[in-house]
Each structure stands twice: as structure tokens, then as C-alpha cells.
Image: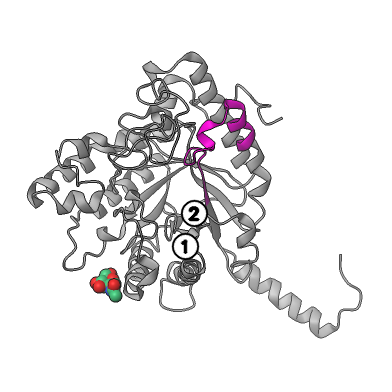
Amino acid sequence: MVPLNLSPLLLVSLFILSAARSAFSYTWGFPYDSQKIRGVNLGGWLVLEPWITPTLFDITGDSRIIDEYTYCQYQDKTKAAAALKVHWDTWITEQDFKDIAAAGLNHVRIPIGYWAFDVASGEPWIQGQVAYLYKAIAWAQKYNLKIIVDLHGVPGSQNGFDNSGQKMNSPTWHLNATNVQRSNAVITKIASQFKDMSGVIPAIAALNEPAGWYGTAMMNVVKQFWHDSYGNIRYPYGGDRTSNTVVIISDAFQPASYWRGFMPAPRWEGVILDTHIYQVFDNSLVRWSEDQHIKAACSRGPGLQESGLWTVVGEWSPARTDCAKYLNGRGVGARYDGTYPGSSRVGSCAGFSGKAVTFSDSYKTFLRKFWEAQTKAYETERGWIQWCWKAEQADEWSYQAGLKNGWIPQNPTNRLYPNICG
Ligand SMILES: *[C@@H]1O[C@H](CO)[C@@H](O)[C@H](O)[C@H]1NC(C)=O
């Protein structure tokens, strides 16, 4: 509706403004405004995770090795480097990209740690990951997949999870300005390397899962980091010229309402909020019935729009227990069977994790329903990226195993339960 009392001056400036807006409209590498993100995370490849490849950790025979940092710290360097090279060469290959494309997916999110780009003296990290990122780019181009480069670990750790590279009780990233400066430098490096490749890398995720539960001390650093990352990713040319690269920011475990009004368009263009939804990392959640899991998934849809930002569910899984070996850390047990500190037993993990041959038909039917409920709910916003493409011995998490064993359809729009969410 046009107000009637506009002054000529205001009309002229509105005209200039709208002309300027269209002159500066962006060509994203993927039509995020009109098509759904359907993807998988290539977890456990360029950042090790004990639960995704338990063998790689067990074979060391050293129980102090609980993450990639200690993997590099407590082994002979040459031996560790050789094992990592074999892992990088074999865990994900061109065939995976071919299979991912053949499954009707359009995105892969690739976690990578800061240490692939920057190792300070005294740090034990072993490098070599970036060459594999370039292989992935070539494969993605060949099979017409989009890559999200996802900075998954920063100096001092942003969350203390083993998947940040360094498991620790009290993460220190946000407490140390040097850590944050190094992280900004890594994002700048990533953004400048890929600034002219938005056709294959349409988006960069500035930092995975910073631990928002540390309160304002953490959140103030996180919000400043999102602002700085926006500048680094959208303005990589050293002037006013913008890239076409979309900036993905993590919700840092805050509700969507927390982010309402944060980095709004049109002042900020091309921002996607990334939220992660798991229903297994809590004593009460692992007690839920199958129906409770499905109902909860369905109910997440509407809330995804509350921030006002484009929102993707960048991690989620059809798992309904935390039974996968080492899921809570190497040598740590599961809430579901009561072997995790402070948990009480719900039941046996047998038949809930491991190889699909051990899964009952009714469990596989549940996995299919839960998968359909989640993808349906998440497609009410920008879409979804399942965690993860493959896992050594946790088929309930593996997209690849889901395809092979029928609880994930070969075409993600094929639904056996189209009314699962009512
Ligand atoms: C801050 O982090 C850097 C590494 O990024 C480390 O060298 C330095 O000692 C830390 N400073 C403090 C005060 O902990």
C-alpha cells in the first residue's frame, strides 16, 4: 500500500534507494530464497571425531588420545601423519560425492579446523587438510554439489567438544583475544581463497557451535565474531565490492527468538542462521518414546522462522539414543544404558546402534518416520543437512547406511508418510 502524503523529495529518494537495491542484488551460488537445502555433513574427515572413526583411535592403544589434538600430541609424529594421510585419502573419496549427488542432495558441509590454516609454535597439530578440501571442490564441481566450508574448531576451543579438535572442561577461545584474532585471520584466509568460487562454495560457516551457555561473556564475543566474519566473508576484495558468498552463523544454542533483529536485511545481506537439533544429549530425551521424538520434530518447524533470518538445520540425526560408541567422548558411556556419569538406565543399547543388520524392522520403520518428520519440518524453512554422511559403526547416524538399508529414500522427496506431521 502506498501512503498518499509522500513528498516529492521522499519519492525521489525512494526511487534511488530501490534502484540502488536492485543494482546491488546478489547472485548467490545457490537459490537459498527459492530452493531447499538438502545435504549431509562430511563429519569425521578433516576433523577427527572418535565416535565416527573409533578404530582410528583404538588402534593407537593410548587412552589419552581422545581428540585430534591428543592424536597428534601423544603419538610419534611420523606415524600419526601417515595414519592421517591414509584416513584423508580413504574416508571420503570421489565415489562419495557421486553417491551424495545420486541421492538427490545438493549440499555437503565440510568441517575443518583452524589448524589446517594456522599452527602456532607449541601446538602439536598435523596439517595437510586443505589439499583435501581442494579435492572436494573438484568433485563437487563434477557432480554439481555445493560446499559449505565450516570452521569447526578455533584456538582454545569454542565449546570444549572433541569435535572442536580439543576436548576440554572449560573452553578458552572467548577468554583470550589472541585466540579470537587468530580465528578472524583464518576466516579472512578462507574467504579470500574462495571469494571467486561462490558457484561451488556458496556459503562459509564462520564457527560451529560456540558454547552460548557460558552466558554474556561468550555471547558478546560470538556476536562480535559474527559481525567481523560478515565483513571478512562479504568484503574480501579490500574495498566496497562484495562477494556473493553467504555467511552462516551458528545460533550458539540460543533460541531463535534471541536472534530476532540481529544482522537484519537489507543492512546485512546473505546471512543464514544455523541451528542444530539433536534429541539424545539429555537424560530425559533418551527416555522419550518413538512418538514423542516424532511429535517434537514436527513441532520444530514453525519456530525456525522466529529469528527473521534465513535458517537452516545444519546438523540433526535420526538417532533416538546416545548409544553410538564414543558419541559422548572416547571411553565415555551412554545415558541410554546408564553408563554415562549421572544417568540412569533406560534400556540396553543392543539393536539401537551399530550395524543395520542388528536393527529390528520396527526400529528401521521408526528411523524412516523420524527422518521424514524432521526433513518435513526443516523444509518449512531453508532446509537441512544431516549429521552425517557416514560413520564406521553407527548406522543410525549414517545417511549412507540409511540409503542402503531403506530408511532414507534414494530421492529425498519420496515419502512413505507424507502426513507424518499432520
Ligand atoms: C591466548 O592464546 C594463545 C594461543 O592462541 C596463547 O599462546 C596464549 O598463551 C593465550 N594467553 C593466555 C593469557 O592464556
145, above or below 411, in the image: below
The reply, left or right, for residue 70 in relation to residue 109 is left
In the rendered image, which quarter contains the N terminus?
bottom right
| SS of the residue under disc 2 | loop
Colour scheme of this structure image? one colour
112, above or below 350, in the image: below
* Quadrant hosting residue 21: bottom right
In the rendered image, which quarter contains the C terminus?
top right
* Quadrant hosting residue 210: bottom left
52, above or below 233, in the image: above
Residue that label 2 marks:
29
Residue 413's mark?
Answer: none
Q: Residue at x 69, y 75 (%)?
A: 17
Number of the front mark, 2 or 1: 1
Amino acid carrying mark 1 in the image = Tyr
* Closer to the camera in the image, 112 or 68: 68
Q: Residue at x 63, y 23 (%)?
A: 417
Q: Is mark 1 within 8 Å of ligand 1?
A: no
* Residue 82 percent coordinates (x, y): 12, 45
Q: Which quadrant of the frame does ligand 1 lie within?
A: bottom left
- Calculate the distance from the C-alpha at mark 2 to the C-alpha at mark 1: 35 Å
Is residue 296 inside the magenta stretch? Answer: yes
* Closer to the camera in the image, 1 or 207: 207
Instruction: State the residue lying farthest toward the top.
Output: 361
Q: Which residues are magenta?
A: 275-297
Residue that label 1 marks:
214
Q: Residue at x 48, y 36 (%)?
A: 317
Q: Residue at x 32, y 39 (%)?
A: 332
Whether residue 414 can be seen here: no
* Residue 420 percent coordinates (x, y): 65, 27
